[in-house]
Image (tube, rainbow, N blue to C red):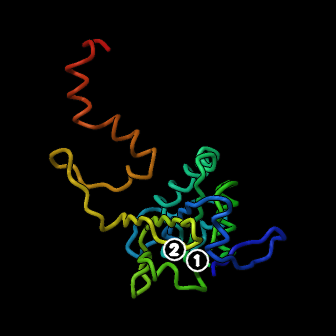
Amino acid sequence: MFDRIGDDGDATTVRMSELFGDSDTLMLYNPMFPRMREDARPIPTSGIFAELPADQAPCPSCTALADMWDGMFAQLDGLGGKLAIVAKSPIEDIAAFAQERGWRHIEVLSAANCTFRSDYGADNTEGRPSPLLTIFKRWPDGTIRLHWAGEHVFARFEQQEPEQDPEAHAVVEPLWALYDVATSPGYAVWRLGHLPANW
């Protein structure tokens, strides 16, 4: 049972099976909120989370993903998929953060009172968070099964270019895909061979 904020504004619970709605596909993203203790990137400089200690603040990369997904939610919903965020923090904190970020479409949930995140590898035995996307399918007989999970930190991706780090973000993050096209050495070489010199 996940925690969520109900229509009346009070905290309530919801079963995974209820999150599917009419869809057969449910994507649950487990952001690092709170972030990894070693994350030295800046915390928010304004808003209600600017006063949090760094190890309790949300991860900037996970936040960017949710920002983009919320903006494209209408297209995702039109394809028949459901998407929700499952944070480790209490539901009041993640709901307040979602409101501050302007997320209007993605459902935010908390696993603070259940073992979902640790069961599926988003939190290790010491409670260290990892950014994990899990996709569940509801079969015609009603059975719900794990369909796919991608662990961003430990997944091994084949290196496409010399000295290029394996990167998982391009799988799910449009911003990184655009950045890769703009900065990829392979694209630059193709461009030189196929486009006019003054292009």
> In the figure, is residue 57 to the left or right of 11?
left
Q: Residue furthest front?
A: 141
The kind of secondary structure element at disc 1 is: loop
Rendered view: 8 above or below 63: below
User: Amino acid type of disc 1?
Assistant: Ser
Between 1 and 182, the one lying in front of the other is 1
> Quadrant location of the N terminus?
bottom right
Q: Position of residue 92 (x, y in %)?
A: 69, 75
Point out which mark residue 188 bears: none
Rendered view: 30 above or below 160: below
Q: Position of residue 24 (x, y in %)?
A: 58, 61
Q: What is the count of numbered marks?
A: 2
Point out which mark residue 34 bears: 2
Q: CA distance from mark 2 to mark 1?
A: 6 Å
Q: Position of residue 112 (x, y in %)?
A: 59, 82
Circles 2 and 1, Cβ within 8 Å, touching? The answer is yes
The kind of secondary structure element at disc 2 is: loop
Query: What residue is disc 1 on?
Result: 89
Q: Residue at x 48, y 70 (%)?
A: 32
Rendered view: 97 above or below 127: above
User: Amino acid type of disc 2?
Assistant: Pro
